[in-house]
Image: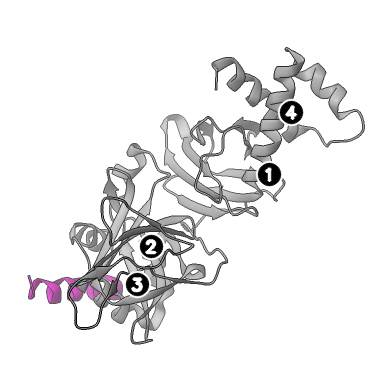
Amino acid sequence: MSELTEVLLAEAAVFLARDQGSPGFLDRFTEAVTDDPRLASLVLDRALAAQARAGQASVGLDPGDLRVEITSSGASLTACGLAAQEGRVAATLRLVDAQRRPVAGAAVAVHTEFGDRVVVTDPGGWVHLSEPGQTLHIRVGGGEPGGGASEGVHTASGGGVIQLPRIRRAAGNAAFELAAAHEDAARDADEQARWRIEAGGVDFLCLDRKGGYDLTVLLTGVTAEFADAAVGAYAAGFLTWGRNGRSHRWMVPLAPSPLGLAGSLYSTDEDRLDRRSVEVRGAQQLMSALGDQLDEVVSRSVRHSDALEAWSVLCQRLSPGRQRAVVEAALAEREQFL
């Protein structure tokens, strides 16, 4: 996409966000986007396509928040907020469609107590902005403006249960056969037993080994600046079923990785994932939501954690009390097996 086309696409997206589509729409568009008619028609088509791929969603964002929302079209909106100088909040947004492709040319309405404006996603699906105030209300498409302060991230998207892809091990034979193709999985050509699936706006990297099933939770729509400040602050929670049919709830603290925020579980025996259960939010809020399951979930999750740094940092963030005591006990138990 040329720089000129990108500028015109942004103009077209802003026009679509502000115009109600009443009779005379094309005449008003021609007056607003003044360029070669063929080029103007091209960017209008692209802006309309971006609008359809983006769908509708709204979210409230405070400094320190990380939000992931699934839009009406199945797209994923990831929003990060950081406190900036002079009472401002800096925010980074990324929008990818249901096929995990960046959405360029999607209009995003931003509301603060000081006013409103419309910004447009770039070719990578990103928006970077800095606004006065403490709370941003962000709207993609025609959804209602987000309300109030956020408690963190909550993602719960439809689609039901995902069968985790596996390799078949022939009975009485050590040879492996590649598992049948799975509609929610894409095989990595470099590793026969590795797949990548999407659920709730995050990616799960799946590795089936003889020693157990590994799951890595990956959230890519974050900047390095936000990721560096987020160690132990956020976690992913989800529900699975093991091969024996028992359900297991997990909590995976997230830490910076070359691809974004990530955390892994090693040597599990999981077989299915409840797509609707996936959520990423503030780690303390996620622990509070576990209720009576806190001890069980934290103990199991720490026992299968790939690295304990994020858990240790999370423990340091917690005030003295039940949550901190549970994490300390789980870390001490894990230490005995290292």
Q: What residue would you read off at disc 3?
A: 250
Q: Amino acid at mark 1?
A: Ala
Identify the residue under disc 2.
236
Q: What residue do we see at 9% from left, 71% from top? A: 335
Q: Nearer the viewer, residue 322 or 241?
A: 241
Identify residue type, mark 4. Phe
Closer mark to the observer between disc 3 and disc 1 = 1
- The type of residue carrying mark 2 is Ala
The quadrant of the rendering that contains the N terminus is: top right
- Where disc 3 sits, the SS reads strand
Q: CA distance from mark 1 to mark 2?
A: 29 Å
Mark 3 or mark 2: name the one nearer the start of the chain: 2
**Residue at image mark 1:** 52
Q: Position of residue 307 (x, y in %)?
A: 18, 60
- Calculate the distance from the C-alpha at mark 4 to the C-alpha at mark 1: 15 Å
Name the side, left or right, on which 99 lies relative to 176: right
Q: Earlier in the sequence, mark 1 or mark 2?
A: 1
User: Which of the numbered marks, if any, corresponds to residue 15?
Assistant: 4
Secondary structure beneath disc 2? Answer: strand
Q: Residues within 10 Å of mark 2 (few under 14, many from 20)?
A: many
Q: CA distance from mark 3 to mark 4?
A: 44 Å
Q: Position of residue 65 (x, y in %)?
A: 45, 49
Q: Nearer the viewer, mark 4 or mark 1?
A: 1
Q: Which residues are magenta?
A: 321-338
User: With 276 as the anchor, is 143 left or right in this view?
Assistant: right
Label 3 amino acid? Trp
Q: Look at the picture and state if 4 lies above or below 152.
A: above
Camera sees residue 124: yes
Q: Quadrant of the C terminus?
A: bottom left
